Image (cartoon, rainbow, N blue to C red):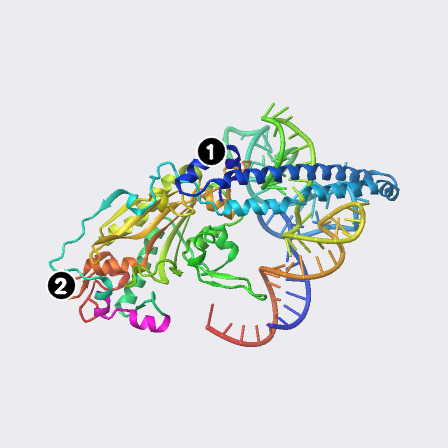
Amino acid sequence: MLNLELLRREPDHVRIASRRRGIGVEFVDRVLELDRERRAALTAAESAKAEKNALTAEISRAPDKKAAAAELRPKIAALDERIAAAGAGVPALEEQIAAALSEVPNLLDRVVPDGDTEALNVLQRTWGEPPAFPFAPRAHWEIGEALGILDFERAAKLSGTRFSILRGAGARLSRGLAHFFLDRAARNGYVEINPPLLVSRSTMWATGQLTKFSDQMYAFEGDGENEALYLIPTAEVPLTALHRDEILAADSLPVRYTAHTPCFRKEAGAAGRDTRGLIRQHQFEKVELVWLTEPERSFDDLETLTRNAAGLLEELGLAHRVMLLCAGDTGFNAAKTYDIEVWLPGSDAYREVSSCSNCTDFQARRSGIRFRRDAKAKPEFVHTLNGSGLPIGRVLAALLENGQRADGGVDLSPVLHAFAGFGSIEPDGSVR
RNA sequence: GGAGAGAUGGCGGAGCGGUUGAACGCGUCGGUCUUGAAAACCGAAGGCCCUUCACGGGGCUCGUGGGUUCGAAUCCCACUCUCUCCUCCA
């Protein structure tokens, strides 16, 4: 949620920044007008309340309270009417302001390039060379099915399209990868969390998921008995909301959390895209990295977060590149986002494995996550950052495609031996 | 699922319907003392909103939302959450 004060003080700044997103800026004047009405009504109602409180205090000071009350009752009744009349519209105005503001995406950082398609994202750096194969490299679903470690047909039988089954070495490798990612996150100072996978509507709203991604989420509708619950589309949701409505001590920052969770997405609007393989699934596992940090350092922390995630690919020996997303490609919550893309030989292309975003105070304001610089300071909103570090399925796909051998087996990065329990998958599906 | 108890400031814990924005303790912060620290003593601290250039002024806030009353942390209603016991289970 945008800062209403900022909008009040520098409406032009908000207009300019919002135009870069390609969104209409009518909301600025509309919100300002609603805000003016709200403040006028508030002031009127509150000054009437002050008068009433003065009369009430007079009664409590009077020697004969009953007599004083009887005498002042008509004046108080008149004030009650004034208070009610003046303040009547305030809740509705507040709702309208909140509703208008909650649909507006975060302000983009200055360095975010203009552009409305991913083609205009800007290459930051590349690491590693796409490997050369003396044969035509196959896609991971072909490799995995041939090895008997991926089973899409039976997954479809159980649950439909966009589900997968990992079997034998595939399941073990998946588990090892999660372990590896969590291990490195711990080394980098992240505290591991095992959060709920079902969260309330208010939690979804607080992390900014309910506007743009509403149609992406699986939900249990609430009924008379039970509150609505949403399956998390990413661990970013529970991790960021962990300190909702809290005031943190400055010396506890930055707070860094990691979690390995399943993620659930409907993938509405992705019909026909990535229909094969592990790239786009309704259910996938991911290790997420989240920071709550001080405003002045959040963009530096975004660099650190991005390097934490990219460092995993380096350790795995997977070629990748880092892109700075352009305005049109940057998500609702984010002020600035780096995508990390890994090389997939089977697709002859880089594919996104991690989006690392600085959401500045946008989520923190929605969620009420604040900190106090010192004992006497006013609470300020923290900045929140998040990124994958990393998704299990997509990285597993990259490992299969990059490590594939002519005989159909797959060699794994040595660093994984300790985590997966093996160094290669042989053509018959056995491990070595 | 059944029965009961409770929700007060960073924490613990008081609180006859009328100077209780809230005693007391702990913790925090600032002093005094000390070479320094501890202890002791003195003092200061909630949050949100409106208004003001500022000093300041005002409103709301004792789980949430309503109600009673001139006046509610205190009374009534609903909801939410927590705890205990039973039941059930991983």
Q: Nearer the viewer, residue A304 or A1?
A: A1
Choose top left, top right, bottom left or bottom right for residue A338: top left
Check disc 2: other Cα within 10 Å, few if <14, some if 14-19, many if 20+.
few
Marks 2/1: CA–CA distance:
60 Å
Q: Answer whether residue A302 is magenta in the image.
A: no
Direction from residue A143 to residue A59 in the image, left or right: right
Question: Magenta region: which residues?
Answer: A143-159
Dominant SS type (magenta): helix
A291 vs A137: above or below: above
Give the SS element for disc 2: loop
Q: Nearer the viewer, residue A347 or A15?
A: A15
Quadrant where the image shows the C terminus of chain A = bottom left
Q: Residue at x 59, y 45 (%)?
A: A94
Query: Given the image, on which type of amino acid does mark 2 rest?
Result: Ala
Disc ID at residue A406: 2
Which is more N-terminal, label 1 or label 2?
Answer: 1
Q: Amino acid at mark 1?
A: Asp
At 75% across and 39% down in the image, what residue appears? A53
Q: Position of residue A57 (x, y in %)?
A: 78, 39
Q: Magenta stretch: residue A156 in it?
A: yes
Q: Are marks 2 and 1 on the same chain?
A: yes
Residue A194 seen by the camera: no
| Depth order, front residue of A352/A396 | A352
Residue B5 is situated, as x and y percent measured from the top left of the image, at 68, 62
Residue B79 in the figure: left or right of residue A1: right
Q: Circle 1 is placed at which residue position?
A: A12
The image position of residue A64, as x and y in percent, is 88, 41
Task: Provide the secondary structure element on which disc 1 rests.
Answer: helix
Depth check, front residue: A114 or A425: A114
Q: Is residue A409 above or below residue B71?
A: below
CB under 8 Å between callouts 2 and 1?
no
Residue A23 horizontal side relative to residue A140, left or right: right
